[in-house]
Amino acid sequence: MAKSKMHYAWLILVGLCLMVGLGKGALNNTAGLFISPVSKDLGVGIGNLTLYLSISSIVTLFFLPIGGKLMAKYNIKGLLVVAILLQAGSFAAFGLMSSIWGWYILAIPLAIGGVFITVIAGPVLINSWFKKSNGLALGIMGAASGAIGAVTQPVVGNLIASKGWSQSYIFVGLAVLIIVIPVILLLIKKSPKEKGLLPYGASAAVENGEAAENESEKGISIAVARKSGAFYSLALFFFLITAIGSFSIHIPTFLANKGYSVEFSGTVMGVYMIGVLLGSLILGILSDKIGSKNTSLLAMILGGAAVLMLLFFANVSGFIMVAAVLLGFMIASIGTLAPALTATLFGSKDYSQIYSLASLGLAVASIIALPAYGYIYDFTGTYTIVLWIIVGMFIVNILAVLFAFTSKKKLVDQGHWN
């Protein structure tokens, strides 16, 4: 009878789906819908406004290693409650601002909260709770962000059109707070030990006593990993995939430049989030079936096809929709394949440290890419140059993945996997 009982790891996943999904899908991914209307009302350039996202990325860059230490040291429920108060509270406070400096200042608490809610908590808790179906769990969590985003994007787009950006910021921020805080308090647990459990999948491998559990902790040490080509290739993958993903913030402005309405932009972003949903699930399953390497290469090829559609068929709304789905599918690799690649390349031994270090590429990319795209648009009046740069990034990322696995093989052959 006990064997048929659902493992608590799945309730952890439900909590993460809601928390991370709302943090990403309802807060981070709707930010682009506000840029054009806020820019017009405040009379500031797109590049200047999107600097707040760069400030947020700089804060993320410095706070990531601190956040990892805090999660290891303090009560995770308290940390996550404070984190969502900072992230969603800052988002709501944007609605009270009338100067661009408000975005610059609030970007700091927004980022500190987001480090926990959208970057660290999900992969670390899943790695702690799941020893089996890790890729699937990551995929489901990413899919939740897509599902929530698919609902919130068109809703927020229409909300901005009918109520204005100010009221929309406040409504969305407060709604996320009201939902997420109870979820954290009721569902989230730091580790299986708190419930007197083994991680999901660990019990099936305990036939040889502690040997199986020790086997699940094998891998390459942080000391060896951070000096390897595999690590730098992984960090480059993190950097480029995030730089590519940063363009999603500019999609509504890209569409406005092509003559489409804010309502259409909201619909497109909703379709894009459906792509994230599908990509998260499919990429998670594929990473378990055919490996994270082959799955990553597939995602890069599909993403490249999406950007080519935006370059050559932007005047056809049907192609815009298809491109949005494919781009969302590829961007799902940030939340699904990036953690899976880390585990495949370096194992579980020093997973959290290696993942946190490689994740610095996420923040660095946003610091550079977000304003760069905005300034290129301000200077040229088009996103054409940006899109060609992104095509180049896809090619480099394919090469980075191939090199990472070549480097890993050398490390294993040298006896560093133990």
Image: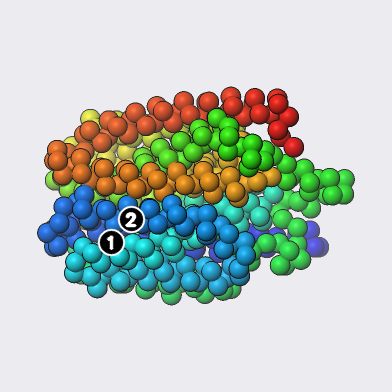
Do callouts 1 and 2 mark residues in contact (Cβ within 8 Å)?
Answer: yes
Q: Which residue is pictured at 53% across the width and 69% down the height?
A: 79
The amino acid type of the residue labelled 2 equals Ile
Q: Position of residue 64 (x, y in %)?
A: 49, 55
Q: Secondary structure at mark 2?
A: helix
Instruction: State the image quarter where residue 289 is shown.
Output: top right
Q: Secondary structure at mark 1?
A: helix
Q: Position of residue 264 (x, y in %)?
A: 22, 51
Query: In the rendering, which numbered label is found on residue 104?
Result: 1
The amino acid type of the residue labelled 1 equals Tyr
Mark 2, Cα crowd under 10 Å, few <14 / some 14-19 / many 20+, is: many
Q: Is residue 255 above or below residue 188?
A: above
Identify the residue under disc 2.
55
> Is residue 14 something one can see in this rendering?
no
**Position of the C terminus by quadrant:** top right
Query: In the rendering, which numbered label is found on residue 319?
Result: none
Nearest to the observer: residue 111 or residue 37: 111
Q: Which residue is pictured at 26% across the width and 53% down the height?
A: 50
